[in-house]
Image (cartoon, rainbow, N blue to C red):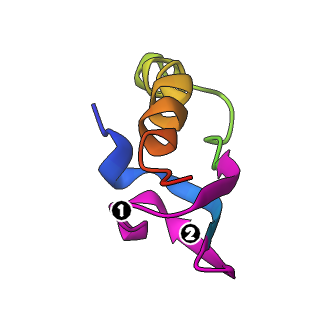
Amino acid sequence: MLGLESLEGEFVIRDNDEIIRHTKARDLPASFDHLIKFEPRIPEPPHTVNDHVEMSKYAEYLQELMTREKK
Protein backbone atom coordinates (compact mmCIF):
# COMPACT_ATOMS: atom_id res chain seq x y z
CA MET A 1 0.00 0.00 0.00
CA LEU A 2 1.58 3.22 -1.14
CA GLY A 3 -0.88 5.91 -0.08
CA LEU A 4 -1.29 9.58 -0.82
CA GLU A 5 2.25 10.37 0.32
CA SER A 6 3.74 8.41 -2.58
CA LEU A 7 1.22 9.52 -5.23
CA GLU A 8 2.74 11.18 -8.30
CA GLY A 9 1.09 12.91 -11.23
CA GLU A 10 -0.09 16.45 -11.91
CA PHE A 11 -1.64 18.38 -9.04
CA VAL A 12 -2.55 22.03 -9.44
CA ILE A 13 -3.77 24.26 -6.64
CA ARG A 14 -4.61 27.93 -6.23
CA ASP A 15 -3.43 29.60 -3.07
CA ASN A 16 -3.50 33.34 -2.40
CA ASP A 17 -4.34 34.02 -6.08
CA GLU A 18 -1.29 32.05 -7.23
CA ILE A 19 -1.48 28.90 -9.38
CA ILE A 20 0.97 26.28 -8.08
CA ARG A 21 1.81 23.00 -9.80
CA HIS A 22 3.18 19.90 -8.11
CA THR A 23 4.16 16.47 -9.39
CA LYS A 24 4.09 14.78 -5.97
CA ALA A 25 1.06 14.84 -3.70
CA ARG A 26 3.31 14.91 -0.63
CA ASP A 27 4.54 18.37 -1.72
CA LEU A 28 1.05 19.88 -1.48
CA PRO A 29 0.62 22.19 1.49
CA ALA A 30 -1.62 21.31 4.44
CA SER A 31 -4.13 23.93 3.27
CA PHE A 32 -4.76 25.92 0.10
CA ASP A 33 -7.59 27.88 -1.49
CA HIS A 34 -8.66 25.46 -4.25
CA LEU A 35 -7.64 22.16 -5.78
CA ILE A 36 -7.76 22.80 -9.51
CA LYS A 37 -6.35 19.60 -10.99
CA PHE A 38 -5.94 16.09 -9.61
CA GLU A 39 -4.39 13.79 -12.18
CA PRO A 40 -2.53 10.86 -10.64
CA ARG A 41 -0.10 8.94 -12.82
CA ILE A 42 -1.67 5.67 -13.94
CA PRO A 43 0.81 2.75 -13.89
CA GLU A 44 1.68 1.25 -17.26
CA PRO A 45 -0.24 -1.91 -18.14
CA PRO A 46 -0.30 -4.74 -17.49
CA HIS A 47 -1.51 -3.73 -14.05
CA THR A 48 -0.75 -5.85 -11.03
CA VAL A 49 -3.26 -6.56 -8.30
CA ASN A 50 -1.43 -3.99 -6.16
CA ASP A 51 -1.76 -1.41 -8.96
CA HIS A 52 -5.52 -1.99 -9.03
CA VAL A 53 -5.79 -1.71 -5.26
CA GLU A 54 -3.86 1.58 -5.30
CA MET A 55 -5.85 3.00 -8.25
CA SER A 56 -9.10 2.12 -6.49
CA LYS A 57 -8.10 4.60 -3.77
CA TYR A 58 -7.71 7.61 -6.08
CA ALA A 59 -11.22 8.88 -5.25
CA GLU A 60 -10.39 8.70 -1.53
CA TYR A 61 -7.17 10.63 -2.13
CA LEU A 62 -9.09 13.28 -4.06
CA GLN A 63 -11.57 13.66 -1.19
CA GLU A 64 -8.71 13.91 1.30
CA LEU A 65 -7.07 16.70 -0.71
CA MET A 66 -10.39 18.53 -1.02
CA THR A 67 -10.61 18.69 2.77
CA ARG A 68 -7.50 20.88 2.67
CA GLU A 69 -9.32 23.59 0.71
CA LYS A 70 -9.82 26.78 2.69
CA LYS A 71 -12.50 28.34 0.47
Q: What is the CA distance from the residue labelled 1 to the residue labelled 2?
A: 9 Å
Query: For the point 45% across and 16% down, which residue is it?
Result: 49
In the rendered view, would you say 60 is above or below 6?
Answer: above
Magenta region includes residue 55: no
Element at label 2: strand
Q: What residue type is labelled 2?
A: Thr
In the rendered view, would you say 18 is above or below 47?
Answer: below
Q: As drawn, is 26 to the left or to the right of 63?
A: left
Query: For the point 35% across and 53% down, which residue is it?
Result: 6
Q: Quadrant of residue 30?
A: bottom left
Q: Nearer the viewer, residue 23 or 29?
A: 29
Q: In which quarter of the image is residue 13?
A: bottom right
In the rendered view, would you say 38 is above or below 26?
Answer: above
Percent across and percent down for residue 46 are 65, 28
Q: Name the residue under label 1.
A: 26
Q: Mark 2 points at which residue?
A: 23
| Magenta part of the chain | 15-39
